Image (spheres, helix red, strand yellow):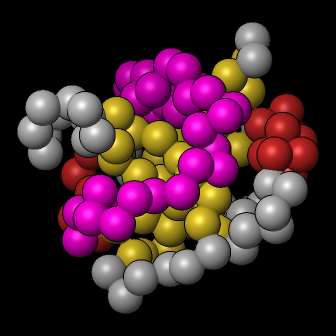
Amino acid sequence: MQLKITDEAVEQLQTLNHENKQFLLLWYDIEGCGCGVNGVPTIRFVNEVKDYHVSVKNEVFKTYISEQQMTFFAPTMILQFMQGAFRLSSPNEILNPFISISSINQPLEEGTEAR
């Protein structure tokens, strides 16, 4: 799995990471979506990597994803920053057209991340 981050998105992420969290996590957010297969691909800064996380190739940030959540993402993705929000897409589709800047540093609640 690979994540390319545009220069504009890198600049915004570096600005937003004011707590200097070590890792970028690709995360399938199911909170408030009804069930485990209804969710939204998104990103979060985290300080801890779990044993079930696998590395995502990225040249800027140490990036990880839960092995079970990989099915909700594409093998190759791009993260852009445009019109005040992040956009996560693949060559075939837009995975999340609007990732708010305020959500990037929100902590993951215990139990919200599938193994």
Indicate the quadrant containing the C terminus: top left, top right, bottom left or bottom right: bottom left
Relative horizontal placement of residue 6, taking residue 15 as reference (left or right): left
Identify which residue is drawn at 67% across, 34% down: 102
Relative horizontal placement of residue 28, taking residue 11 as reference (left or right): left
Residue 110, visible in the rendered structure: yes
In depth, the one of 58 and 20 nearer the eye is 20
Q: Quadrant of residue 112?
A: bottom left
Which residue sits furthest bottom? 51
Identify which residue is drawn at 32% across, 81% down: 52
Decide: is 105 above or below 8. below
The reply to whether the magenta stretch includes residue 94 is: yes
The spot of residue 18 in percent (x, y) is 86, 56
Relative horizontal placement of residue 77, taking residue 105 as reference (left or right): left
Decide: is 22 above or below 111. below
The reply to whether the magenta stretch includes residue 74 is: no
Q: Quadrant of residue 40?
A: top left
In depth, the one of 66 and 18 nearer the eye is 18
Identify which residue is drawn at 62% across, 27% down: 100
Indicate the quadrant containing the N terminus: top left, top right, bottom left or bottom right: bottom left
The spot of residue 23 in percent (x, y) is 64, 69
The spot of residue 109 in percent (x, y) is 40, 59
Q: Quadrant of residue 7?
A: top right
Magenta-drawn segment:
87-115
Identify which residue is drawn at 54% across, 20% down: 98
The spot of residue 10 in percent (x, y) is 82, 45
Residue 91, visible in the rendered structure: no
Which residue sits furthest top? 83
